[in-house]
Amino acid sequence: MTASKRVAVIGSGRIGRAWAIVFARAGFEVHLHDADRAMLEGAIPSIRESVSDLREYGLVDESIEQIAARISAHENLADAVHDVDLVQENIAEILEVKRTLFGELDRLTRPDTVLASSTSGLPASTFTEDLAGRARCLVAHPVNPPSLVPLVELCGAPWTTSETIARARALYEEAGQQPVTVTREIPGFLLNRLQGALLDEALSLYARGYASAADLDTVMRDGLGLRWSFMGPFETIDLNAPGGISDYATRYGAMYRSFAKDSAPFDWSPESIARLDAERREVLPRGEIENRSRWRDRRLMALLAHRRATAKSDK
């Protein structure tokens, strides 16, 4: 890593703080900005706490001080984005606000700075169309939190150049992420559409009374999730029939087609959501969600530590 690599992280909420960790632990100089001064002031202490957890699981090699020293907080947007190689935007999913911010970023940054949004569902074309530098804009959608789940989806607008995608991919790889390219725009990109399909079926099964929320979570956690923690769905079915995917399709294709006929997409009805929320609140009171989120992050750290320890034997 050369000292010249700089990124600006705009928005210091959970995603922004995690991105700051991603880049800083990889050796990047990170400029953190937030329009909310209180959020910005609380970001560095929170980042230091998260890095401490990462060190506990052996997921960072440097000290907290070394990593935190690469992150600086900037109240002024122009100062934050001055002479950076990449801007990672993490503000609210409000189209007009994003459009305004990207106009500012286009004006304030170098012509070759990559401008990326962490948006979960807004295509880049919806907020970059009128920019002079729109060819350098794209979506770089992470998984929450990107400091623990390395996937990042790269999706350009129709006018985003292939050079921009290639440069972005190289930067994220250098930061230790696993970028994938969405070859053309689609709302929700890849991850949220896959997650949405599974969530839709789980909610439908729950709403129709086939199982409790707890048992459906168990199906994922202790069933599909175990395999999917180290294999994707295509490799999974390729290994689940002696002759691979074509054999699997011959054996089970008709069964899956019959499921489609019985499928009842969930309409996110308030009644079903209220019932589901009440069931979850019996298990986890609302005031404990933050603590449970911290527990989730530590479980992810343990899984990452295990994957790192076994990486050589997997090759």
Image (cartoon, helix red, strand yellow):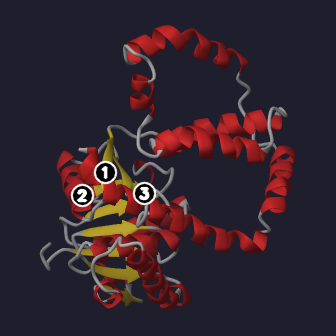
In the picture provided, is 105 more to the left or to the right than 39? Answer: left
In the picture provided, is 84 more to the left or to the right than 234? Answer: left
Q: Relative to the observer, which residue lies in front, 115 or 201?
A: 201
Residue 154 vertical placement versus 203 (above, below): below
x and y percent of residue 168 in the render?
24, 57
Q: Is residue 86 visible?
A: yes
Amino acid type at mark 1? Pro
Q: Relative to the observer, which residue lies in front, 107 or 172?
A: 172
Give the labeled residue for mark 1: 179
Of labels 3 and 1, earlier in sequence is 3
Residue ID at (42%, 89%): 75
Quick check: marks 2 and 1 in contact, CB under 8 Å? yes
x and y percent of residue 218 in the render?
68, 44
Residue ID at (32%, 38%): 183
Numbered disc 1: secondary structure = strand
Numbered disc 2: secondary structure = helix
Q: Which mark is residue 142?
A: 3
For marks 2 and 1, give the CA distance: 7 Å
| Label 2 crowd (10 A; few <14 / some 14-19 / many >=20) | some
Q: How many marks?
A: 3
Give the labeled residue for mark 2: 173
Residue ID at (55%, 90%): 38
Amino acid type at mark 2? Glu
x and y percent of residue 232 in the render?
42, 37
For marks 2 and 3, give the CA distance: 13 Å
For marks 3 and 1, give the CA distance: 9 Å
x and y percent of residue 92 in the render?
54, 66
Quadrant of the rendered structure where residue 207 is? Answer: top right
Amino acid type at mark 3? Pro
Q: Is residue 129 visible?
A: no
Residue 249 vertical placement versus 53 (above, below): above
Residue 255 vertical placement versus 192 (above, below): above
